[in-house]
Image (spheres, helix red, strand yellow):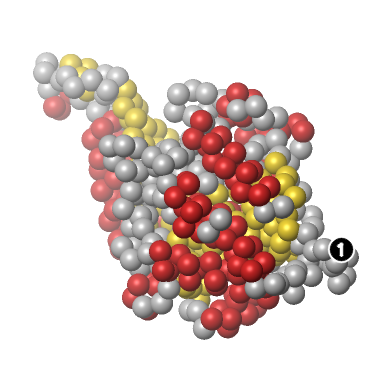
């Protein structure tokens, strides 16, 4: 099956008829359909399929006559879940391209000397349970199931229950990466670097450190009409000023700070709220810069709270340090096609595997708008096919 045919198969799964965006949350019906699609695609290619107790999957292309039995494998792939009302390309492009690259290599008559695996990691976005790259974190041991299972989604569903309801059981085991020698993830670019360079494919140099922080603002609920402005203890005001402070601090430092999610109680039109909970996404070019940015925002929020008669507590829910991909591997891969080496501010499973000590690289495919995590996310078909060829060339080099 061609790349185009596979892309058509995935196109309607989890897509909103109103916005055109995707809601492919893990351990839901849409995600189960995607997992079934990958199972069928892997088995149709004769790949040796592994599915673990979390829903992580790998389809292995084993050498018929390995030149040196026991050589570590080459793993590729990405994820199939999405952010809320997300785009079509973030994640699925890497999975479909990996399957298509296997087809290309076979059409070329290529015979790998070491295993090639096509992987799908679950809950990469962290959109449901708040911890990005959850599947790869559990597989590498960066997070423990005993802790992760107690996480709750927006509806109060525990992760352990969601996984069980999907017919999965982590006690049966997780994928082993002991026999993986390197990992290459293809991904749509989340930015305009390749557009500015006028090239279709790039290689990643690093991932900026980033984190998610919960800001809990508490005050006093009261009547919106009868309560004088000077008598209010309004946490919404404290939040608003903190959001403005985040914007200013990030701009001054040349970094990134975003409050993109908000919960208000009691959430009434005619009531001063008693509580506002907001989530900050912060990203910086260095670990020290990230700590300084979050500290500055928290400090200004606390100072504002003291003036408003409110309180603020800050909790780090998910923090990932800086990742520098294997520089020798990046240079080798960039040399295949003369591709540029560029940084990324977005987190990926590749970063988790790299932090676990696995030599890791990433390929990016040009995004003409630079928009991501949105229904407007896009890549031209010609660039997608160029990405498939680039990935096939990369796998051929690494598996020879």
Of 15 and 211, nearer the camera is: 15
User: In the current view of this chain or complex, which residue is farthest to the right?
Assistant: 69
Q: Position of residue 120 (x, y in %)?
A: 61, 49
Left or right: residue 66 compared with residue 136: right
Rendered position, 292 above or below 68 = above
Q: Secondary structure at mark 1?
A: loop
Q: Position of residue 46 (x, y in %)?
A: 72, 52
Give the total number of marks visible in the rendering: 1
Q: Position of residue 28 (x, y in %)?
A: 52, 31
Mark 1 lies on residue: 70
Report which quarter residue 27 is drawn in: top right
The structure residue drawn at horizontal position 56% and vertical position 79%, both measured from the top left corner, is: 334
Q: Position of residue 36 (x, y in %)?
A: 59, 39
Of 112 and 301, nearer the camera is: 112
Rendered position, 135 above or below 98 = above
Of 393 and 120, nearer the camera is: 393
Tell me the quadrant of the picture where the N terminus can be found: bottom right
Of 245 and 26, nearer the camera is: 26
The structure residue drawn at horizontal position 28% and vertical position 56%, both measured from the top left corner, is: 248
Tell me the quadrant of the picture where the C terminus can be found: bottom right
Does residue 164 appear in this view? yes
Left or right: residue 242 compared with residue 325: left
Left or right: residue 365 compared with residue 218: right
Does residue 321 appear in this view? no
Left or right: residue 64 compared with residue 253: right
Report which quarter residue 86 is drawn in: top left
The structure residue drawn at horizontal position 64% and vertical position 43%, both measured from the top left corner, is: 39
The structure residue drawn at horizontal position 37% and vertical position 32%, both measured from the top left corner, is: 277
Rendered position, 155 above or below 78 = above
- Label 1 crowding class (10 Å Cα cut-off): few <14, some 14-19, many 20+? few
């Amino acid at each position: 099956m061609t790349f185009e045919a596979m892309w058509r198969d995935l196109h309607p799964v989890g897509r909103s008829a109103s916005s055109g965006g995707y809601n492919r949350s893990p351990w839901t019906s849409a995600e189960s359909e995607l997992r079934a699609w990958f199972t069928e695609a892997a088995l149709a290619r004769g790949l040796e399929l592994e599915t673990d107790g979390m829903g992580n999957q790998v389809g292995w292309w084993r050498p018929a006559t390995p030149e040196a039995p026991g050589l570590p494998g080459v793993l590729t792939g990405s994820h199939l879940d999405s952010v809320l009302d997300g785009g079509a390309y973030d994640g699925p492009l890497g999975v479909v391209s990996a399957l298509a690259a296997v087809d290309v290599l076979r059409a070329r008559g290529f015979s790998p000397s070491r295993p090639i695996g096509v992987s799908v990691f679950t809950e990469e976005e962290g959109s449901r349970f708040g911890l990005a790259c959850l599947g790869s974190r559990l597989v590498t041991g960066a997070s423990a199931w005993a802790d992760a299972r107690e996480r709750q989604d927006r509806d109060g569903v525990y992760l352990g229950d969601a996984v069980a309801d999907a017919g999965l059981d982590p006690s049966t085991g997780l994928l082993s990466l002991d026999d993986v020698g390197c990992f290459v993830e293809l991904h749509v670019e989340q930015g305009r670097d390749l557009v500015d360079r006028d090239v279709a494919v790039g290689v990643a140099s690093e991932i900026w450190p980033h984190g998610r922080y919960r800001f809990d603002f508490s005050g006093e609920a009261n009547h919106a009409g009868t309560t004088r402005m000077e008598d209010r203890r309004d946490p919404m005001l404290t939040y608003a000023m903190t959001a403005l402070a985040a914007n200013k601090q990030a701009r001054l430092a040349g970094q990134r700070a975003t409050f993109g999610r908000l919960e208000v109680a009691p959430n009434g039109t005619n009531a001063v709220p008693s509580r506002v909970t907001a989530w900050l996404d912060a990203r910086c070019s260095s670990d020290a810069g990230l700590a300084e940015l979050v500290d500055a925002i928290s400090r200004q929020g606390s100072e504002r709270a003291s003036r408003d008669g409110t309180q603020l507590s800050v909790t780090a829910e998910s923090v990932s340090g800086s990742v520098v991909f294997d520089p020798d591997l990046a240079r080798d891969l960039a040399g295949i096609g003369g591709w540029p080496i560029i940084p990324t501010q977005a987190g990926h499973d590749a970063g988790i595997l790299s932090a676990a000590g696995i030599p890791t690289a990433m390929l990016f495919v040009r995004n003409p708008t630079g928009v991501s995590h949105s229904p407007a996310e896009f890549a031209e078909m010609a660039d997608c096919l160029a990405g498939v060829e680039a990935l096939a060339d990369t796998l051929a080099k690494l598996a020879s």
